[in-house]
Each structure stands twice: as C-alpha cells, then as structure tokens.
Amino acid sequence: MTKRARDTKNPQRAQPAAPASAFSGAGRAHRTSVAVVLILYLALATAYVFRLPIDAAPDESAHRVYVGWLAENRRLPVFDPADAQHYELHQPPLYYALCLPAYYAAGGGRDVARLTHAVRFVNVLLGLVVVLLAFVFAGHLAPHRPWAAVGAAAFVAFLPMQLVLCASINNDVLSQALTTGVLCLLVGQVRAGRVLVAQERRGSRKRGRDEHPEWRAAAGSGFTARRMALVGVLAALALLTKSQAVFLAPVIWLAALAAVGNGDITLRRALALAALATGVMLALAGWWLLRNKVLYGDPLAMGVFLKAFVGSRPTPEKMMGQMSPIAYVVFWVPWWTFHSFWGMFGPDALGRFVFYPSWCYWVLFILSGAALVGLARWLLSPGSAAPWQRRALLAPGLLGLLVIASLVRFNFTFFQAQGRYLFPALALWAFLFVVGLTHHAPARARAPMTIALSALMLLLAAGGLAVMGALGG
C-alpha cells in the first residue's frame, strides 16, 4: 500500500488539505457580479450615511459618546448604570478604538454632524468586508452553486436594515465581520476535506432537474493547528468587540466535532484543536472578562447593563397590560422582529420609526415562507445537500439558534424585538434564504432567478432612501 493510500485511509496522518478559495468554483461572470455588488453597496451605504438623520439609528448617540469618551480620557471606561447618557460604556472597546482616527480627523466633537458622518464611514468599510465574507461563506458551503454565493453577497449588501447599521455608528458591523470570518474559517476547513467529483448525474441536465453533485474525501483534513489558532484570534477580537461573541466558543467545538462525523479527523484530534482555538480566544480576550468580573461581578457585564434599562425601556409586563400574553408572544414580538429585520428606520428626534408600505413586508413574508420550504427540500431530499454540507451547517446553525434564543430571552425581560439582534448570523440567513428560494427552480433557471432576487433587494434598498425621508432630523 502506498503512503498516499495509507494517508487517505488515516486522516490523522494525511497531509493537510488546502482550503479551496470561494472563488475557485466561480467563473468570470460570478466574480464580475460580486464586484458589481460591492460597488453598488458602497454607493448605497454612502447615500445612507448622508440621508439618515443624525442619531436616527439604534443607539447611535450613545455609541458616539463612547468614541468621544475614549478620545478625551484615553483609558477604558467604568460603566455606571445611573448615567443615562453613557449607557453603552459597558461594551468592549475594540470598535470604539478603531473609530478614533476618524474622530480625530473630523476635529473631535466640535461639529456633531461632521463627526458623525466621518465615524459612520468606518462601518461603511467594515460592511464591505461583511459582504465579501458572506460570498466566501456561501461559496464554501455550496461550491457547486456559485450563483448562490453571489446571491448571498447581494442579500447582505442590499438588506436595508444592514445598510442602516453600516451607515451609522455602532459596534454591530465589526462584530459581524469577525464572526463571519470565524464561520468562513470553520466551514472552509470542512470543505477542504471534500473534492467535487461530478456536478450532475447522467441525464439530469436533459430533465432540467436539480444538480446531484458527487463528492469524495480528499487525502487529508482541512483542520490544522494553525487555522484553528487563527479561528481563536478572530473569536477573541469578536469578543473584544461585542460580548455576544461568547457564542462562538460552543460553535468552534461543534465544528470540530462535525469534522469527526465526516471522518476527517479523530475525536482526540478534534478536541485538541477546539481546545487550542478556545485557549487562544481566552488568552487574548480573557482579560476583558476578568475586568468585568472584578468591576461588575459578571464577566459579560450584562447584569449592570440591564440595570440601566430599568425604567427607560418597556417591559413585557407593561406591553401585556395592553394586550394578552399570547398576542405579545405570538404576534407583537414576531411582527416587530420581522419588520425590523428587513428594514425599519429610526427612531428620529421625536422617537418615531418609519417603515416600508405594508405590502412590501407581505411580499417579503411570502418569499421567506417559500425559502423555508425550499430549504427543507434541499436539506432533506436525497441527492441535494451532501452529508458533509449538512454537517458543515451544524456550527453556523448553532450560532443562529443561539442568537434567536438570546433575542427571545431579552424580550422576556424588556421589549426589544429588533431584527438586528439576529445579524451576527446574517451570512447564514442570507445563504439559507437564497438557496431555499432558488431550490424551487430547475438548475438552469437558478442563475437568472438569483439575479432577479438580487435586483429586488437592490430596489428595496434604493426605496429605503425615500422611506427614511419621513424621519425628522
């Protein structure tokens, strides 16, 4: 038996497989399309920067105050729940430190409008990274369907609520970029152990039916100590951006275990690599958790943050005084979450929010339902999603479930049904939406369907510029 044959049978001894680029399955048309999406995103995000009134985005004034506090004091803040103006000072500092050059370039806080516009462009650039990483993430999960990767990038680029975040001051977009980077590395390592053998079975093109890709294991695993250490670095940076990134710890472990299920590495090797990534994460970001424990008695500082919300945010009890508990849980929270996921603008100086016409949300609701049905067909139908793809989705899926559970739990403490709280997993939602919706079409119709879907999202984003005109300055 040759060494290569032995290595193929023993993944622990096999040479590491090189993670294939998300561009490797994409042709010139796909790469050109992604470039167009990136250019259009920059144009739209810039337009949103100047169209969105100052502080007419979630918590923008408090995030700007944090940047100013760092610039003036040059040390980490200590959060006081009684200080209503500084209610974001419990947040990790990385994003706000990244904004300091823009703050100084704008001349400090003398001109609030100029300062706000300058700092907003930090997120415009970070949003560009998120769009590109969404393309890479989808390309790893479905390398045989490059148009799905283009569609996922367009979904992220043109989602109106995402554009609002990218055109305002907040730490959400940097958190998205780092979290999506972690997902790309994890899913890419799973993909590295798989080689596409055949795109279609005989006769499937003639019938116009779904592709039936065939895969074989590569001579080696994509999981290496170096790549998992890089996962730990990105996860640590995410944790130094937003405390919610603590969710990445179980995601890392599940990804390693999924590789065991694929037969890529042994259980012992998987546990060692997951421990390495987690150890790097804690080594680089653990000091922040210890600081919070010493100052607030809570590594994530959530307890002291919730104290600041008391009296200033509506509670479920207050909301259920105006409606039944069933109406609150089944209708009110899902209604606000769905609308604000796609696009909700505000609050303005009067505390008002503005929305698209109701028929827009009904169309999006129907498309979302169709995407769910198509996604179930893709995951469950024989010959559609390969076993390795289902296992590769486990780790991102866990992140999706954790952010959903976090949103639900928060809304049993305060009424905060904001779809943006689901955006740490935005690349996953984009991929699932595009794959699920286009799975209803024959294989040859998926490219034009993806282009049409991207054009629809572009129109929705452009329409947001008109809708937010109803906001007061």
Image (tube, rainbow, N blue to C red):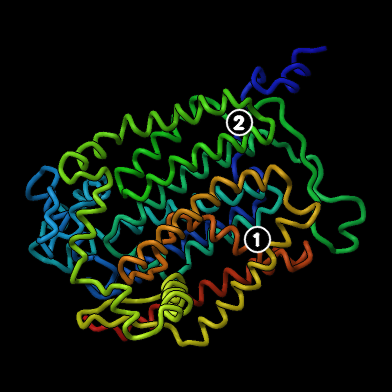
292 or 373: nearer the eye?
292
Residue 466 rendering spot, x and y as whole percentages: 38, 83
**Circle nearer the N terminus (1, 2):** 2
Q: Is residue 256 left or right of residue 264?
A: left
Q: Quadrant of the C terminus?
A: bottom left
Asked which quadrant contains residue 438, the reply is bottom right
Could you tell me the amino acid type at mark 2? Gly
Q: Is residue 6 left or right of residue 22?
A: right
Residue 215 rendering spot, x and y as whole percentages: 77, 40
Residue 349 rendering spot, x and y as whole percentages: 20, 79
Q: Which residue is mark 2?
A: 222
Q: Quadrant of the N terminus?
A: top right
Position of residue 154 relative to residue 99, above or below, is: below
The reply to whether residue 255 is in sight is yes
Position of residue 36 relative to residue 282, above or below, is: below
Residue 457 rendering spot, x and y as whole percentages: 53, 72
Q: CA distance from mark 1 to mark 2?
A: 25 Å
441 or 272: nearer the eye?
272
The reply to whether residue 463 is in sight is no
As drawn, the label of residue 435 is 1
Could you tell me the amino acid type at mark 1? Val
Asked which quadrant contains residue 11, the reply is top right
226 or 290: nearer the eye?
290
Mark 1, secondary structure of its residue: helix
The residue depicted at 51 percent of the width and 24 percent of the height is 272
The residue depicted at 44 percent of the width and 63 percent of the height is 41
Position of residue 63 relative to residue 227, above or below, is: below
The residue depicted at 80 percent of the width and 43 percent of the height is 214
